[in-house]
Image: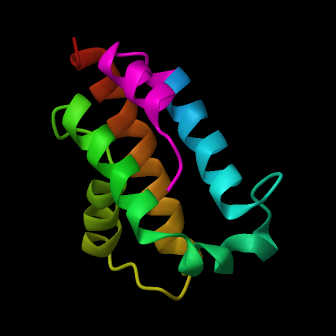
Amino acid sequence: MKNYEKLHDLLASGKWREADEETRRCMLKVAKLEDWDAGEYERMDRFPCEDLHTIDRLWVKYSRGKFGYSLQKQIYLSLGGTRKCDEKIWAAFGDYSRMASRRKMVEIP
């Protein structure tokens, strides 16, 4: 498992945008990718659960339950999302996530 100290520190300091970028960087490193490519999403099925759980736990803890992959999953499923990509549901999820993120980033002290 990767060391997530920098992510921890950014989240603990409330530096959400920097933490988001660090999360992306960490995940790419763990997945051994240079960038997310449409053809690479199947690698997420093999992404180490321990790493994903650690990242999620950090986000949920420091955002006081407002951000995290487990929360995104709940929202995606509530919109009717499944493992099979449906562009309409994915677009609705993106719209919901962007709107919620803007509102929550302002509210988190």
Whole-percent x, y for residue 92 in the image: 44, 61
Tell me what residue is drawn at x 64 percent, y 57 percent: 30
Nearer the observer, 77 or 51 = 51
Residue 32 lies in quadrant: bottom right
Q: Is residue 63 visible?
A: no
Magenta segment range? 1-17
Tag count: 0
Residue at image position (51%, 67%) is 90
Q: Quadrant of the C terminus?
A: top left
Which residue is nearer to you in this view: 60 or 82?
60
- Tell me if residue 10 can be seen: yes
Q: In percent of the image, x 50 and y 69: which residue is there? A: 48
97 in the magenta segment: no
**Image location (x, y in percent) of residue 38:** 77, 69
Up-down relation of residue 73 to residue 23 (above or below): below
Query: For residue 45, what is the image quadrant?
Result: bottom right
73 shown above or below 86: above
84 displayed left or right of 78: right
Q: Position of residue 2 (x, y in %)?
A: 53, 49
- x 35%, y 51%: residue: 54
Which of the 4 image quadrants contains residue 36? bottom right
User: In this rendering, is residue 89 above or below 8?
Assistant: below
Q: Residue pushed farthest bottom?
A: 84
Residue 11 x %, y %:
36, 24
The colour style of the image is rainbow
Can you name the residue that lies furthest to the left here? 64
Magenta stretch: includes residue 16: yes
